[in-house]
Amino acid sequence: MTDTAPDQLDDTVWVEKASLIDSIPRPVQIASVAVVFITVWQLITLSDLVPPIILPTPLETWNDMMFVGANVLSGGYMLDSLWTTVKTVLYGYALAIAIGLTLGIIVGETAFGERAIMPYLVAIDTMPKVAFAPLFVAWLGFDIDSKVALAAFIATFPIVVGTAAGLHAPDANARMLFKTMGASRWQTLYKMKLPTGLPQIFTGLKIGSVGVMAGAITGEFLGGGNGFGELIRVAASQLNTPRVFSLILYLSLVGLALFAATSYAQRVLVFWHKDRVIGAEG
Amino acid sequence: MMATARVSQLRASTGGETVYELTGVGKTYARNRVRALEGISLSLERGSFSSVIGSSGCGKSTLLKIMAGLIPPSQGRVTINNQPVRGPRRDIGMMFQHATLFPWRTTIENVLLPIEIRDGKAAAKAAWGRGEKLLDLVGLGGFESVYPDELSGGMAQRAAICRMLVTQPDMILLDEPFSALDEISRDFMNMELQRICTETNATAFLVTHSIAEAVILSDRVYVLAPRPGRIAEVVEIDLPRPRTLDMITTPKFGALVERIRTRLDKGDFE
């Protein structure tokens, strides 16, 4: 082998080559998308295709974000607004988790729940839930309660479905094993079915965390109050589009934080690597 | 050692004592009126190893589920130590084709799970030492706090053996325990199973569809004929103990395998 010239070796060895994209670090890839997006946005605003009142420039939006940020940090009225919205989202999420897990366990664990309750849940889930917003305002008033109710209402269903699916996740082997150990229904549920189903339950929670944001803001659009949703509505009515844009961007940060917190909880609770029971392959 | 103490205690008891008995057991599934089992009678002596072998759908699994107390028989009597079996019991241990260890529990927490379920967390903690000794016995000493996703298939099945033995059952039921392993691991685990059964003086009942596996492990092989499942023949395996893998090549082993194979073929075409 030693007498083979290197250039001949190059012909015979099949070397795996990393593609160009793979060699770029991920943060750079993410940033590049933002750069392209903002550039296109800037070009559109420069081109006179759209009036500035409809689409603000990136710089105007940035400046407004700085203004909103300064107001929040200095304890201005926007901090109260942000806190109202965050409270709505957190209460709504907590309520959705409590109701969603309970209903999910009833539906996933009992034959009656699956046969008799699930059809109603599916029927309600197919309704446009936002349409219930005026009802919640009529029932619960213009305070935070009606927004919490709408947020929870929207976020509950994915959690129910995720929990029910999670409880069906354990295979026949695990069920049989628990039977031979003489486990009670309750023991089987909390020592085996719930832990096994955690990945599916968290999928439901993540979808719910997105829904709870949508519900809270929709509630604030329609039911007043002093949350960020109301600020957006007011800014839009004044044709203050940079303000609308910057408020939406701040809201997306709140949503992102909720999603990230849920993902973090999942990583801590579902610390094992495979979402299946060991030795159950094949 | 707990295991040796147990062995000497059991040796002191009467030899040839019947641990487990089935009398005229039959099972008819009401839904489609299928007779899965008919007239199964057998009695298993303490410290003996018996196997049941038969083609797929001959009722082996039904038989084992009845013996484990998971489903009731339609006819007949099932007793362990002269007490009727009316549900899952702590003196019956069972093991399946898949280890089914739970990934959120360490190996020893998986082993102690039957105690935790039957007697609570405090009892499981008190039995920690017993769990460690069992893990030592199967060659998993030092793996107590390892999570099961770091165990190989064979190691996972060893842990499952410990979990089956941790309640010190009088009867162990094995449902094709190593059939999901590769052949090399399977042979090795069968020899390990023999050693563990000898050391704990376990009374074992194995369901398998490998004739060689049944012969190498058992004192007695029950050949099951299908539709309805019934005992076609009882083959006494008088090979000396301890059994070794070398015995597979002996003429005597070959003759026993041949006898069972012939019986199985006949059963299929009756």
Image (cartoon, rainbow, N blue to C red):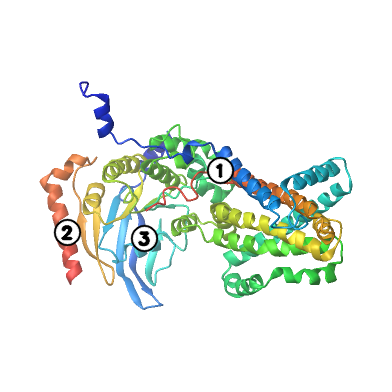
Mark 2 and mark 3 lie on one chain; the one further toward the N terminus is 3
Q: Nearer the viewer, mark 2 or mark 3?
A: 2
Instruction: Please say if the residues under marks 1 and 2 sit with CB atoms less than 8 Å apart.
Output: no
> Closest to the observer: B31 or A63?
A63
Instruction: Please say if the residues under marks 2 and 3 sit with CB atoms less than 8 Å apart.
Output: no
**Of all residues shown, which one is farthest toward the right?**
A76
| Amino acid marked by disc 3 | Leu
Whether residue B4 is visible: no
Q: Quadrant of residue A135?
A: bottom right
Q: Residues within 10 Å of mark 1 (few under 14, many from 20)?
A: few
**Of all residues shown, which one is farthest toward the left?**
B251
Whether residue B234 is visible: yes
| Residue position marked by numbered label 1 in the rendering | A271
| Residue position marked by numbered label 3 in the rendering | B64
| Amino acid marked by disc 1 | Phe
| Residue position marked by numbered label 2 in the rendering | B261
